[in-house]
Image: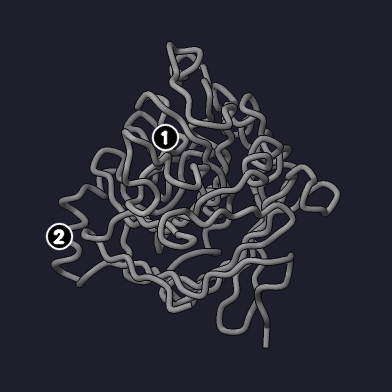
Amino acid sequence: EKGIKLEFPNAPRVYMLDGEDKYKMFKLKNKEFTFDVDLSSLPCGMNAALYFVEMDEHGDKSGLNPGGAKYGAGYCDAQCPHMRYIRGEANLLDWEQTGWGLHGAPLQEEKQAVCEGKEQCGDRGEGLTGYCDKDGCGFSSYRMGDKQFWGPGQDFAVDTSKPMTIITQFVTHDNTDDGDLVDIRRLYLQDGKLFKNSQARVLEGGGDSLTDSMCNEQNKAFNQTSNGYKDAGGMKTMGEALGRGMVLSMSIWDDSFGRMLWLDGEKSRFDEDPNTLGVKRGPCPFKYGTHEDTTQYAKEHGSMSATFTNVRYGDLDSTYSLI
């Protein structure tokens, strides 16, 4: 209940344990996951992440890996094929003050597996997905056309300069724990007011949540060269991972190469036009966000941190109150 404060740059990636030597396994189909968060000190270029990743309950503990879950072993996410191994990742949630993303990345393999060659490991340049969808399907309010939904100050619907409660719901086709995952919904609670997620204004079909139809429509609208999300099985595949059980992970980090531009940058590549639909994901300058930038920001403005508290989960609409 007291939660955890992750302070940059010294905070490691952390996981939730169930006892001393195994991970807490979350099975969230037909459930909701809720937590309170304060990310008011984060500038452009910083990423506070809370997400679920499919990992072995015991951290793949073995003779070659005696540490196991107790020492945070066994991690692998949707980017892992190029590191010679893979584990399923879904429902990634990333935040800065100026931008946020709700992401899902389906994987075709249930357990760790070595990939060989482009067909298995994937190659974005050739439109090959491989075992997993590295890009995933995401919902960014700014990118979807609502620039005043999320940001610091009273001019935004959700004010990131103040603490808030975030509710994520995993809806199945038949409203049972065994049904297929079809929808990932998001709600926000701040100052006693409940906010539904913003609408996808730039899409003809609209929508305010992650569904297969929304993910496929944005893929076409943003002129993506491939659709790894669909190739890897979409919502159904992510739901199967949720049914097997996933591990909760939290982190705070920067990236001098990518600079978190995929999260809230004016563009992600030097040759992109910010005026092209789907390119601009936030107000952060293209050249800002290196480790040098974030370190200098900390010197001028004080420490940067993300605080996660009151983590809870349960039946839909059961973990929050407007009272």
- Neighbor class of circle 1 (other Cα within 10 Å; few <14, some 14-19, many 20+) is some
SS under mark 1: loop
Q: Is residue 201 above or below residue 214?
A: below
- Neighbor class of circle 2 (other Cα within 10 Å; few <14, some 14-19, many 20+) is few
Q: Is residue 46 left or right of residue 136?
A: left
Depth check: 107 or 191 in front? 107
Which residue is pictured at 86% across the width and 49% down the height? 174
Which residue is pictured at 68% across the width and 66% down the height? 314
Q: How many marks?
A: 2
Q: Is residue 286 above or below residue 199?
A: above
In the drawing, what numbered circle is on residue 296?
Answer: 2
Q: Position of residue 66 (x, y in %)?
A: 32, 42
CA–CA distance in space, label 2 to label 1: 28 Å
Q: Position of residue 110 (x, y in %)?
A: 58, 32
Disc 1 marks which amino acid? Asp
Q: Position of residue 132 (x, y in %)?
A: 53, 28
Residue 63 visible, this orientation: yes
Depth check: 33 or 164 in front? 33
Q: Would you say the residues marked 2 and 1 are in contact, meaning their CB atoms lie under 8 Å apart? A: no
Q: Position of residue 311 (x, y in %)?
A: 53, 70
Which residue is pictured at 48% across the width and 24% down the height? 113
Work out which residue is located at the far bottom of the displayed protein and give it: 323
SS under mark 2: helix
Q: Which quadrant: the C terminus?
A: bottom right
Work out which residue is located at the far right of the displayed protein and give it: 174
Q: Is residue 47 left or right of residue 301?
A: right
Disc 2 marks which amino acid? Gln
Residue bearing the label numbered 1 = 273
Residue 208 visible, this orientation: no
Q: Is residue 5 above or below residue 86?
A: below
